Image (cartoon, grey):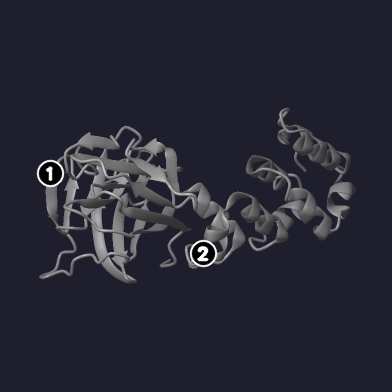
Amino acid sequence: MWPVGRLRIPSQDKLTAGIILLLQETMTVTGAASLPVPVLEVIFSYLDLPDLLSCALVCKAWHNCLNDENSLVWKLQCLRKLTKEASNGELLSLVPTYKGKLRAFYHSFNPGDCSRNVYIKQNGFTLHRNPVAQSTGGARGRREFQSGRHAWEVWWEGPLGTVAVVGLATKNAPMHCQGYVALLGSNDQSWGWNLVDNYLIHNGDHQGNFPQCNNAPKYEVGEKIRVILDMEDNYVAFERGYEFLGVAFRGLPDEQLYPAISAVYGNTEVTMVYLGEPLDG
């Protein structure tokens, strides 16, 4: 059993502090495990994510309660964090669990880490590119990856313009520049696939056509691109319409990498949904 000190009590939140103090009253081996699951679910639903992670370490009963990704805990967390459009619509239809939907939210575009000409819409997953002439805007995801395997989908909901790039960036890659350029891939801090011309770009250089086939079809607005990042073997690959297109970049650095896009067309919108670990084994 983990010590009481692992539970974080934020002083600014009296409700959360009261709930955690109530939990601490039960933290004997028998007490912690004796609360009925429905009671635990209601109590846990009021806690924030860092506190839930701490609670999962307390005992097996609490861990099992929080390990159910469709439990009332995660359903109520979704209701608190997600808009109705995101939780009830088609946006997260491929994310099967409440905990998965919440995880997708925490991996969506970061409203504090994007171009000044971009803003994140109320649904939390879609960015809007303002119509500012002679500029390129980008955005990074909220969470970085340095280990494991990850998959997410990106799709444009408006015109691509002359350049529309999807890929990866470090924290040091710029998210804004003058002119209409392939911002993602413009230096050694980012890697991108330009959907308009079907070419890869890194460190400002074209890295060849992608996918590597003759007369590859061009991207169509609304078509979902799945990005597959493997930080164990250091590569990124792409799928389109559930068709595996191949590995785009190998030899990625052992650094923190973020999902990212860059766009030029005014009023275009781009959505990103994190899916979790790829299902290809």
Assess disc 1: are there few (<14), some (14-19) or many (≥20) residues with their C-alpha within 10 Å of its C-alpha: few
Under circle 1, the secondary element is strand
Say left or right for 211 vs 65.
left
Quadrant (top left/top right/bottom left/bottom right) for the N terminus? top right
Residue at 52% of width from left, 47% of height from top? 106
Under circle 2, the secondary element is loop
Quadrant of the rendered image containing residue 236: bottom left
Residue at 24% of width from left, 44% of height from top? 184
Contact between marks 2 and 1 (CB within 8 A): the answer is no
What kind of residue is marked 1?
Asp
According to the picture, the residue beneath numbered tag 1 turns out to be 205
Residue 208's spot in the image, x, y percent? 12, 55
Q: Nearer the viewer, mark 2 or mark 1?
A: 2
Say left or right for 102 vs 215.
right
Residue 122's spot in the image, x, y percent? 49, 49
Residue 241's spot in the image, x, y percent? 32, 71
Residue at 20% of width from left, 41% of height from top? 133
Mark toward the start of the polypeptide (2 vs 1): 2
Residue 278's spot in the image, x, y percent? 43, 62
Seen from this angle, which residue lies furthest top?
11
Say left or right for 123 vs 117.
right
Tell me: residue 152, above or below residue 202: below
- Judge whether residue 110 can be spotted in this image: yes
What kind of residue is marked 2?
Val
Say left or right for 1 vs 207.
right
Tell me: residue 204, above or below residue 11: below
According to the picture, the residue beneath numbered tag 2 turns out to be 95
Counting the numbered discs, the total is 2
